[in-house]
Image (cartoon, coloured by chain):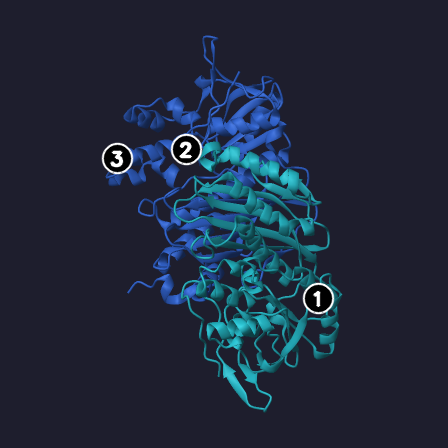
Chain colours: A blue, B cyan
Amino acid sequence: MVERIKDVGEFGLIRRIRELLDREGVSTPGVTLGIGDDTAAFLPRPGCEILITCDSLVEGRHFLPDWITFEALGRRAMVQNISDIGAMGGRPLYALVSLGLKEDLPLEKIDDLYRGFLKELNPFQASIIGGNLTRCGAELFIDITLIGEAEQGKTLKRGGARKGDALLVSGCPGRAAAGLDLLLHRPDDPRLKDHPLVRAYQTPTHRARLGEKVARAGWATAMIDISDGFLGDLGHILSESRVGARLFPERFPIPQELKEAAEELGRNPLAFFLGPSDDYELIITCPPENAEKILDLGKALDPPVSLTVVGAINDRPEVITLAAGDGTETPVSLGGWDHFLEKTRRRKNG
Amino acid sequence: MVERIKDVGEFGLIRRIRELLDREGVSTPGVTLGIGDDTAAFLPRPGCEILITCDSLVEGRHFLPDWITFEALGRRAMVQNISDIGAMGGRPLYALVSLGLKEDLPLEKIDDLYRGFLKELNPFQASIIGGNLTRCGAELFIDITLIGEAEQGKTLKRGGARKGDALLVSGCPGRAAAGLDLLLHRPDDPRLKDHPLVRAYQTPTHRARLGEKVARAGWATAMIDISDGFLGDLGHILSESRVGARLFPERFPIPQELKEAAEELGRNPLAFFLGPSDDYELIITCPPENAEKILDLGKALDPPVSLTVVGAINDRPEVITLAAGDGTETPVSLGGWDHFLEKTRRRKNG
């Protein structure tokens, strides 16, 4: 018989989760009080800023339970948050997990969800120190608060990009969006689950280790992770820094698999690269003389992370242009994912 | 025309919220990065532990939008969390607000919700430094993460109660449950909204200022706030401290209004005092010689908070008895609210 939440109740479920975390999780230095009191508590390290972020996934909105395992769901929920800490140049430490759960959910699915969280947290020696469980009716939700630390004054914000800076991107943005489109295009093809683009969508990777190294080195001027799509998140840097960007589409890192998927889907691969996509890659700006050193930081990671110079910052606030090899420049719209408008944002771009 | 979320989109809504917070909120020392980047950041004070808690409210589960204003909803959501920080002896500093919202919600309701948050945060010079907005379908949810601080080593946990300790409670537990029952009993009576018990249910008060003073004084051994009901939360202290409690029902603070409501509802007022009720009062244990000093701490607050000695701690693990004036003792079940079982928990109590 499958055991479900309603069979053990809230307190039985909390006990089960604590046991799983004790068995399969790690312990993070600094925790003075973990799960099981009114609050969790920790002692911050002197000389460090505390970083804090939260992000949620809602059933039907960000995932469909039939399309994703609970372990993959847990990984994705945690990666979102780790990516945000990494994009500031920080290192994840402690997570609080708040869940809205249906009472007939099998307990094994909850185990899988927490195993997904731990798969992402354990490599950082980061741990779950608290949270909240409540019953929901129609839509399961996962809301994670992640706390990290960064050396005081070493965080990398969105507002630091300067005219003349080089514009770098890690990995290959657009892969997750293409993976999702493949799933929508061939919903009944079981082979798709092993397709690299579908995997990029289901279990994306964060670049938090790269982000921390870049921030510590002090060579960059601004950094952001891509969760609204390349143009959307570049737009955040441009508006906070009051600058513009000239992009070199011929240099965009577009892998063969993305070109093939775009052809199958009848779309331009550039649209995947630029448009809404949850890739959790990093956009980084830096003085041009530092670009090569930052590329080397990526190469030195294990596994290495490829970085590409895809543009340059100029002083035309919030204007983005595509510069072709023949010298022509085309303005493009700043577009990003808007949860409520459900379309790419459009702004005047001069 | 009523302006709704879908008219302005996620980014328009974020802008509106930031403007409201700038206008009507306060700024908290230590914030190095507020709303508008990948994470928020703050610089912790040396010698302080960081406390962190999260709690959520889900539509249909914890509230019905037709029965409560959005300002009251915001206050209640924040009070839950402030109460947890206070129950550790801490002071609230920073909040992250994660919302699941329906796209047709009028923007004015969102303003009201944030005004409710600020009404509770501003008196502490505490502020909202981040959060997340997402769209939901059927059930609105509010998930708040609250961060506080306490002097290192001065937090009051659940596990410190010792044999011989006095057992104190603030205010009058059970008022919120009686208020809810009155609403269910007379759903169409418009006068009820001003009834003190209904107000206790709709906009409960936390005891965080008392909690902080008690912890700093160092006179108490354990503390918890009541969110599962008096017996349920006393049970947490007893199980974590491995002790039992003898209660003196004749001393229970049961106000006239609660007696009258119990009579109208055909219930025993003791059941309201002991049973599930979200009152956010504090249960405190301390050596008997400190009890009077803690009562005085409550009296010295502005406004004063009444405290009552309602029992004594003994060494019978997790056993609770009611001691009548005639010397007889009756064991009672440990009961608390369980979100998934939806009934009071029952444990063997010896």
Of A208 and A100, the residue lying toward us: A100
From the top left corner, tell me how far across and down residue B10 is, in percent. 49, 35
* Helix, strand or loop under label 2: loop
Of A330 and A150, the residue lying toward us: A330
The chain holding disc 1 is: B
Q: Which of the two discs, 3 and 1, sits closer to the camera?
A: 1
User: Relative to A247, does residue B306 appear above or below in the rendering?
Assistant: below
In 3D space, how far apart are the residues under numbered discs 1 and 2 (Cα atoms)? 50 Å
Crowd class of label 2 (few under 14; some 14 to 19; many from 20; radius 10 Å): few
Crowd class of label 1 (few under 14; some 14 to 19; many from 20; radius 10 Å): many
Q: Amino acid at mark 3?
A: Arg
From the top left corner, tell me how far across and down residue B273 is, in percent. 55, 73
Query: Is residue B279 visible in the rendered structure shown here?
Result: no
From the top left corner, tell me how far across and down residue A191 is, in percent. 26, 39
The chain holding disc 3 is: A
* Helix, strand or loop under label 3: loop
Q: Which residue is mark 2?
A: A342
Q: Amino acid at mark 1?
A: Val
- Label at residue A186: 3
Residue A344 falls in which quadrant of the image? top left
Same chain, labels 2 and 3: yes
CB-based contact (under 8 Å), mark 3 and mark 1: no
**In the rendered view, does B88 fall on the left or right side of A192?**
right
Q: Which residue is mark 1?
A: B214
In 3D space, how far apart are the residues under numbered discs 2 and 3 (Cα atoms)? 23 Å
Of mark 2 and mark 3, the one earlier in the sequence is 3
Where is the N terminus of chain A found, in terms of image quarters? Answer: bottom left
